[in-house]
């Protein structure tokens, strides 16, 4: 009874093992490589080749797969190591270039741009200062020209008045001298009056003087005096006393106009002196401001040139940084694709090697089952 039980258990174990072999054969046969391998084995079994030759062939094939995998592993390690070196180098270059970019941007934003803004403000202020001083000088010159024109007009009016009064005085004086000469010739007579000829000449001059003085806006106050003299000359008799009074009056008027002209000249000299002092100060201030403006403009040109150079360096740095990122990305992609190809190839090779290994196991342990399954497949119509 015990023997029968052991026999039943042995048969059950054998049946289980054989089922597993058949399932393994079907799995191998389901792969393209396994199907091709089974086709080759079936032909060798059919031609009666020695089993040892078949096993040696399968073992050589398994060894070749293992050797190829070792070579592939070594080649992949070498390639991935070079990838790591290249990517590390790119990372270092990127870090250094980015540091350079930050330094250039900091120089622009923290130093050059603010400095240019300050100098720009200084240039604007100095231009306004130069313009202001020049405007003051122009206005001062215009004012001086107007003052000088006014003085020339005043002086001309005074000189006209002096000439008119002097001529009138001379007419009276000439008549006095003529009268004195006549007195010496006619000692028995007392001739001390102006002749009608001299009075007519005097009145004519007085009228002409009135006309001239009426066109002189600064000497108009003497027009009434001349009118009064004209009236007196037409009504009064010019004896020695009257003549002397008229001469004295003209002398006083001439002295008054001369003194007025002297005061005007003195005032004009003071205005010229003040003008020269003020203009000298303004010219000095303008010169200083102009020099400061020139220096500021030179500084502006210098800092602008430096900014252009730094901005060009920054553009080159950004372009180099972009190129480094692109190259790193390309290298990274290349390495990742190579790693994927390696993994896929290894997986495929492992799969084929496992098929060979499983097939060697079948030949060694279940050759009969393998032969039967291959024969069944052939009989089912699958052609080798």
Image: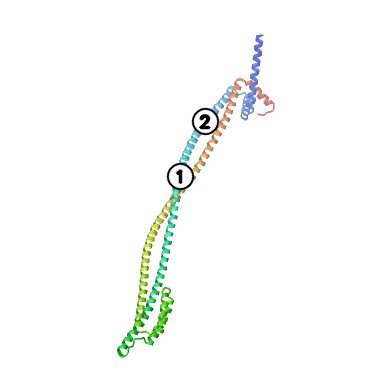
Badge 1: how crowded within 10 Å, few (<14), some, or many (20+)?
few
Q: CA distance from mark 2 to mark 1?
A: 48 Å
Say left or right for 84 vs 274. Answer: right
Give 15 or 223, whichever is nearer the viewer: 223
Answer whether residue 309 is visible to the viewer in this image: no
Counting from the top left corner in percent of width and height, residue 274 is at 37, 64
User: Which of 99 and 70 lies nearest the eye of the viewer?
Assistant: 99
**In the image, residue 293 above or below residue 373:** below
Q: Circle 2 sits on which residue?
A: 73
User: Which one is in front in this view, the residue at disc 2 or the one at disc 1?
Assistant: 1
Q: Is 87 situated left or right of 3 in this image? A: left
Identify residue for label 1.
106
Is 348 drawn above or below residue 308 in the view shown? Answer: above
Of helix, strand and loop, which one carries label 1?
helix
Q: Place residue 23 in its image quadrant.
A: top right
In the image as oriented, which residue stretches furthest toward the right? 380
Return the disc, 2 or 1, that comes first in the chain's sequence. 2
Q: Out of 281 and 233, give the one closest to the viewer.
A: 233
Q: Is residue 149 above or below residue 49?
A: below
Circle 2 Cα neighbour tier, 10 Å, few/some/many (<14 / 14–19 / ≥20): some
Decide which of 270, 278 is in the foreground and name it. 270
């Amino acid at each position: 009874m015990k023997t029968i039980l052991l026999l039943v258990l042995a048969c059950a174990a054998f049946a289980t093992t054989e089922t597993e072999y058949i399932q393994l054969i079907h799995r191998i046969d389901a792969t393209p490589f396994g199907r091709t391998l089974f086709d080759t084995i079936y032909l060798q079994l059919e031609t009666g080749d020695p089993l040892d030759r078949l096993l040696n062939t399968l073992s050589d094939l398994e060894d070749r797969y293992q050797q190829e995998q070792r070579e592939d592993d070594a080649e992949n390690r070498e390639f991935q190591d070079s990838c790591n070196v290249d990517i590390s180098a790119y990372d270092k270059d990127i870090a250094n270039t980015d540091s350079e970019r930050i330094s250039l941007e900091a120089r622009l934003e923290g130093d050059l741009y603010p400095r240019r803004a300050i100098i720009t403000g200084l240039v604007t202020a100095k231009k306004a200062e130069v313009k202001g001083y020049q405007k003051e000088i122009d206005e001062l010159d215009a004012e001086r020209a107007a003052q000088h024109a006014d003085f020339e007009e005043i002086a001309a009016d005074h000189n006209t008045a002096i000439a008119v009064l002097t001529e009138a005085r001379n007419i009276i004086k000439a008549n006095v001298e003529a009268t004195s000469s006549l007195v010496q010739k006619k000692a028995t007579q007392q001739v001390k009056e102006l002749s009608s000829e001299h009075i007519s000449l005097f009145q004519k001059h007085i009228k002409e003087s009135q006309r001239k003085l009426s066109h002189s806006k600064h000497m108009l106050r003497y027009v009434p005096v001349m009118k009064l003299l004209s009236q007196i000359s037409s009504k009064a008799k010019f004896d020695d006393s009257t003549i002397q009074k008229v001469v004295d009056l003209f002398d006083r008027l001439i002295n008054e106009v001369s003194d007025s002209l002297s005061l005007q000249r003195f005032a004009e000299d003071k205005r010229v002196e003040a003008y020269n002092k003020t203009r000298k100060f303004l010219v000095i201030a303008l010169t200083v401001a102009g020099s400061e403006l020139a220096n500021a403009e030179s500084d502006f040109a210098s800092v602008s040139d430096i900014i252009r150079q730094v901005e060009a360096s920054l553009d080159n740095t950004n372009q180099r940084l972009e190129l480094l990122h692109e190259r790193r990305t390309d290298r990274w992609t290349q390495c990742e694709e190579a790693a994927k190809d390696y993994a896929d190839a290894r997986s495929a090779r492992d799969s084929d090697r496992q098929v060979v290994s499983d097939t060697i196991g079948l030949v060694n342990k279940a050759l009969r089952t393998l032969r039967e399954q291959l024969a069944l497949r052939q009989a089912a119509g699958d052609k080798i």
